[in-house]
Image: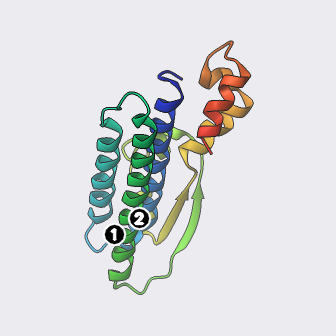
Amino acid sequence: VTGGAAMSIKVWSGLVAQDILRQLYLYHLAVEEVEVEAEKLYRHYCQKVIQLAEKRSIDGVVHTAQLGWQWLSLKRLLKWASHDFRKMEQRYSGNQTFRTVFVSGDLLTKGNDVASNGLFRMLANKGIRTVYEPMCDFMEYTSRLQPALLFGKGSKPRKNLVYQTNML
């Protein structure tokens, strides 16, 4: 992990936010009135997360306050996204009942619509909603059981603990 603890807080928060947005997107595919409605919301809010992460960090004591502000901004952004997806759900005029499946497996395939070959859209079209295993779960698991894979060979347990604490 490069960039130190402050950078990892910023990156980790952004990754968790992207995981939540991906979940909202996949789950709501089944209630779209227009086929790309959920994707547009997803892409819009993902771009907002990226814009927050790209904000230049301020040096010194103010940096801690800036991290707090960015965290609150992410929290607010996720609240807005949740409201927008809920509105999409409320507008759904169909009378279909849905089944829900849990999707686990390869991170690249779950996290990329091209790599999954449209699997989530196909399931949604059949009335199946998906709950997907977040990428960040795997990374946190790896940090605890195989820290060298995430933090580098020879990383110190005490330093790893700082990063793992940020993952909570």
Locate residue 98, reporting x and y percent: 51, 76
Q: What is the C-alpha distance between the residues marked 1 and 2?
A: 9 Å
* Secondary structure category for the residue under label 2: helix
Q: Residue at x 60, y 41 (%)?
A: 167
Q: Residue furthest front?
A: 61
Locate residue 53, reporting x and y percent: 36, 39
Please name whichever residue, 77 or 118, is drawn nearer the observer in this view of the structure. 77
Q: Residue at x 35, y 31 (%)?
A: 58
Type of amino acid at the residue the image marks with label 2: Lys
Task: Name the residue carrying label 1.
Answer: 84
Type of amino acid at the residue the image marks with label 1: Asp
Task: Name the residue carrying label 2.
Answer: 79
Locate residue 7, reporting x and y percent: 46, 30
Total number of numbered labels?
A: 2
Identify whether 132 is placed above or below 107: below
Q: Quadrant of residue 5?
A: top right
Identify whether 164 is placed above or below 118: above
Locate residue 73, reporting x and y percent: 38, 53
* Secondary structure category for the residue under label 1: helix
Please name whichever residue, 158 or 26, is drawn nearer the observer in this view of the structure. 158
Q: Is residue 103 left or right of residue 65?
A: right
In the picture, the disc for residue 54 is none
Q: Disc 1 vs disc 2: Cβ atoms closer than 8 Å?
A: no
Identify whether 87 is placed above or below 144: below
